[in-house]
Image: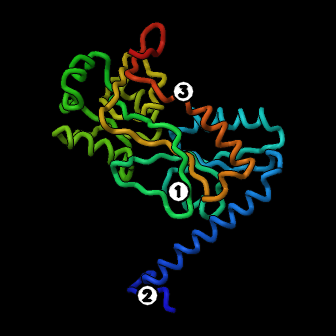
Amino acid sequence: MHTPTQHPRTVRLTAAGIALAAHCEHVLAALEQAHSSVRAQDEVGGEITIGCMPSALEVIAAPLAADLIRRYPKLRPRIVEAEPEEAMPLLKQRALDLAVTYRYRHLGSAIPAGLRAAELFADDLMMAFPDGLRPAVEHEGLSALRDHSWICTPEPSTCRTVALHACHTAGFSPTIEHSYHDLRAGLSLVAAGLGVTILPRMMCNTLPTGVTAVPLPGITRTIEALTRTGTETHPTIAATLTALRGHTGRYSDLGTLTRNSAGVIPS
């Protein structure tokens, strides 16, 4: 049976090779499940390596690791920053045991075979802008920001792709004047009067003075915990998933956010 076909500078699987690879994923999942079953009576301990998207390091990964150490003295959590496209191959290579990632389902993102996704919560996208623009945004929506300077992540970036798609859907192409890698820095740039931006809701739980964040209707990203199929019942991974769900529950209803003298409040 021939499985690879050679092409210039590449090797591609034939139909038979693709079928064989799919069966291998099932075999690997069964082996992982068998290993988890054998370890089911073990206590929670050892080392667990958790991949985490950058925007969740501060708000999810750090408190999760501290909680795990407090609950399970024999457990050593390791946090590794990784975007979803980096985390998924690392999981399959067993370099990670679990990963906190996101997906924009309207972009058609899929979970690779051999991995299992547990949905944690839906993270709305927020329009962040100076307080004075709030009446216009509430009346016109995103199109009210068409003539303002924009602040966005640099290319290539899923966040940038989503922001551009939202603006184009609203009927305009944004003028991007500034860029950032650190999503929280985007809020500081808005507060400095340099422009407007679109950010995930979890980054907007604390807003600088003078900045308002309003949900962008119809666009969310799904925050998920990824594991290798069959490992989710392993005692250490199961305990981590339980703790993770506890830490992410508070993001289920933030609504419109603004900052006043009393701090950040829903409005």
Q: Residues within 10 Å of mark 3 (few under 14, many from 20)?
A: few
Mark toward the viewer: 3 or 1: 3
Mark toward the viewer: 2 or 1: 2
208 sits to left or right of 145: right
| Vertical relation: 132 (above or below) 5 | above
Residue drawn at (65%, 52%), measured in percent from left and top? 232
Residue drawn at (37%, 16%), measured in percent from left and top? 210
The residue pinned by badge 2 equals: 5
Numbered label attached to residue 250: 3
At mark 2, the secondary structure is strand
The numbered mark, 2 or 3, whose residue comes first in the sequence reads 2
- Callout 1 amino acid: Glu
The numbered mark, 3 or 1, whose residue comes first in the sequence reads 1
The mark tally for this picture is 3
Query: Camera-side residue: 151 or 141?
Result: 141
- Callout 2 amino acid: Thr
| Cα–Cα gap, marks 2 and 1 | 27 Å
| Rendering quarter of residue 228 | bottom right
| Cα–Cα gap, marks 3 and 1 | 27 Å
Mark toward the viewer: 2 or 3: 3
- Callout 3 amino acid: Arg
| Cα–Cα gap, marks 2 and 3 | 50 Å
At mark 3, the secondary structure is helix
Quadrant in which the C terminus appears: top left
The residue pinned by badge 1 equals: 86
Query: Camera-side residue: 96 or 190?
Result: 96
Q: Pointers 3 and 1 in contact (CB under 8 A)?
A: no
Residue drawn at (31%, 32%), measured in percent from left and top? 216
